[in-house]
Image (tube, rainbow, N blue to C red):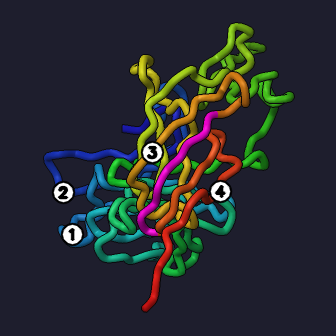
Amino acid sequence: MCSTRSKLKFTKASSIRAAPLISGQPQGIRGQYCSVLLMQYSDNAALSPPEVCFQIGFQENRLYWCDARADKMERISLESGAEREIVLSAGGADMFSLAVFGSYLYWSDRNYANGSIRRGSKNNASDAVTVRSGLGVNLRDVKVFNRDREKGTNPCGRSNGGCEQLCFYLGGSRKSCSCSHGYLAQDGLHCHPYEGYLLYSERTTLRTAHLWDQSSRNAPIRPYENPAYFKNVIALAFDYRQKSAGANRLFFSDVHYGNIQMINDDWTGRRVLAESKTFTH
């Protein structure tokens, strides 16, 4: 069934093998004039929802989709369903989400490099490069934000609505500030650091968790990952001096580099305090 609120809808019928991609131009209330862009009945070639992700490339008027079961990424004409092309065929991939921007496709692959975000050309994504890796199997959706794509304006478009970190447009002249890390001050604009948090390491990343606010989905401090400094962090120490110096000091040892390092929890001021010495006979 076509939706009157969207031009594209993916449907799955559990009792048949067909998996259509449908486009439609809303008409009146019922959303008439739907057309099937792609319908396949072959067990080997059929789309396999819900393991399909898709995005529209408006510049070239193409529909792109990835099929996790077939390990493929393809595209067709958005209007006619013709000109079907394989953009990427990658055995063993687990492509979960897809984004289109400029000349590139961005997608998540939960198998590659322990969960990664990859980028490849629209015409041939076999030249893919890895944008981020080691994100784990919980990696989900990928979206692209770019100011050039945003049209119009709202209160958040002027000086970020006065918000220090995040500004959410609520319609009309209303907006709301929020904090990606830290908590919102009483003025509703600024963000304050938490007085305490749990610090832990994941070999190559330093992360934090809340001690009291378990309902918050945002970490108290932005995670820090830098393979040039972190390869196997095994021990941590903490020097609280937030009120006097504005940031706390974190100490950690890395057995790969054989050293002890210090860094502030705003991720500035990193330096090596001690290194192991190798003696030759």
Q: Which residue is mark 4?
A: 271
| First-in-chain label (2 vs 1) | 2
Give whichever of 71, 65 is nearer the camera.
71
Q: Nearer the viewer, mark 4 or mark 2?
A: 4
Query: Which label belongs to residue 42?
Result: 1
Q: Quadrant of the C terminus?
A: bottom left
Cα separation between marks 2 and 3: 55 Å
Residue 64: give x, y in percent of width and height.
49, 62
* Labels 2 & 1 near each other (Cβ < 8 A): no
Describe residue 22's horizontal placement relative to residue 83 as left or right: left
Q: Nearer the viewer, mark 2 or mark 3?
A: 3
- Look at 74% across and 17% down and name the residue there: 189
* Residue type at tag 4: Arg
Give whichever of 134, 160 is nearer the camera.
134
Residue 150 position by quadrant: top right
Figure check: 162 above or below 54: above
Q: Which residue is mark 3?
A: 236
> Secondary structure beneath disc 3?
strand
| First-in-chain label (1 vs 4) | 1
Give whichever of 183, 267 is nearer the camera.
267
Query: Which label belongs to residue 17?
Result: 2
Task: Assign the magenta stretch its main secondary structure.
Answer: strand
* Residue type at tag 1: Ser
Cα separation between marks 1 and 4: 59 Å
Figure check: 145 above or below 43: above
Give whichever of 171, 278 is nearer the camera.
278
